[in-house]
Image: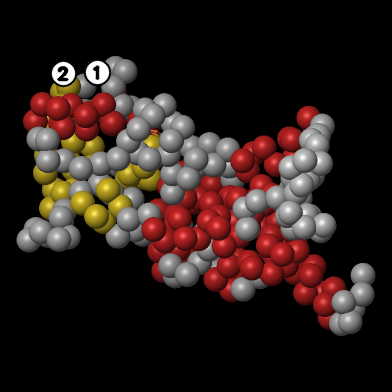
Amino acid sequence: ESITLEVTRYEPDGDTEPHTQSYVVPLRKDWTVLDGLNYVKDSLDPSLSYRWSCRMGVCGSCGMNVGGRPSLSCGTFLSDFAPGPVRVEPLSNFPVIRDLVVDITDFLDKLPTVKPWIIRDDGDVDVHAGEFLQTPAELDAYSQFSSCINCMLCYSACPVYGLDPDFTGPAAIALAERYNLDSRDQGARERLDVLIEREGLWGCTFVGECTRVCPKHVDPASAIQRYKLKAAQESVRAVLLPRGGR
Ligand code: FES
């Protein structure tokens, strides 16, 4: 039994336009799309380019559009598309370097803008001061947002990021919320100042596609809605207490 992968091939630096190349691969019950691509690479066409590493949904490097949906290719089974064919394309909203490999520079540049580290009122955390213990409940408060594997499926699914690449985007905002909800952190106000701009937060129209495609159930859409509420509350506070009173 076999299934056909219809793979987008493209070399921006070469003389080719994006085009589709079809490969027939074995259809095995336990084979993922990544297994199919590895079969192509090993047995049919070594020139095919794509990223992967862990093969178990942890590293986040194998994201691509499968059947039109942003997916981890290592977690998407070929049998779900039988009898095929299966469309395999690079993630949307990112420049293509080659075939299924996209340029993630913009995403990597955005992550540190939200200050994703523990911020304390008294300056940097003193590593000699001992442990900052947390209760299980305090860990639960942010653990959902710490599960992100930076696979960028949410950016590929986000129509706002597609239209406005300056938008901070779902994973980075969820990362900010991960630190805001950490009982050791005191930097929520600083992060709000970064995100309160239109491109930081308000561009989101709550389509919710980010949450739908997230393989780790991080739910960036809920993080963004929480942030909007905080931003609105801060605005009201600024009007009612213009001298910075509390
Ligand atoms: Fe690591 Fe798919 S290969 S998440």
Screen quadrant of the N terminus: top left
Q: Nearer the viewer, mark 2 or mark 1?
A: 1
Residue contact at pointers 2 and 1, CB within 8 angstroms: yes
Image quarter where the C terminus lies is bottom right
**Residue type, label 1:** Arg
Q: Quadrant of residue 32?
A: top left
In this view, 174 is above or below 72: below
Residue at the image position 10 percent from the left and 59 percent from the top: 14
Figure check: 236 above or below 156 = below
Residue 235 seen in the figure:
yes
Identify the residue at horizontal 77%, vertical 40% (top origin).
128
Spatial CA distance of label 2 from label 1 is: 8 Å
Q: Quadrant of residue 194?
A: bottom right
Query: Label 2: which residue?
Result: 1
Left or right: 245, with 116 as reference point:
right
Using residue 225 as the reference point, say whether residue 16 is left or right of it.
left
- Which numbered tag is attached to residue 28? 1
Number of callouts in the render?
2
87 or 194: nearer the eye? Answer: 194
Name the quadrant where ligand 1 sits: top left
Q: Position of residue 136 (x, y in %)?
A: 78, 30
Percent position of residue 95, x then y: 30, 60
Q: Which residue is at 26% across, 56% downward?
A: 96
Where does residue 46 sit, x and y in percent of width and height? 12, 35
Where residue 161 sits, quadrant-wise, is bottom left
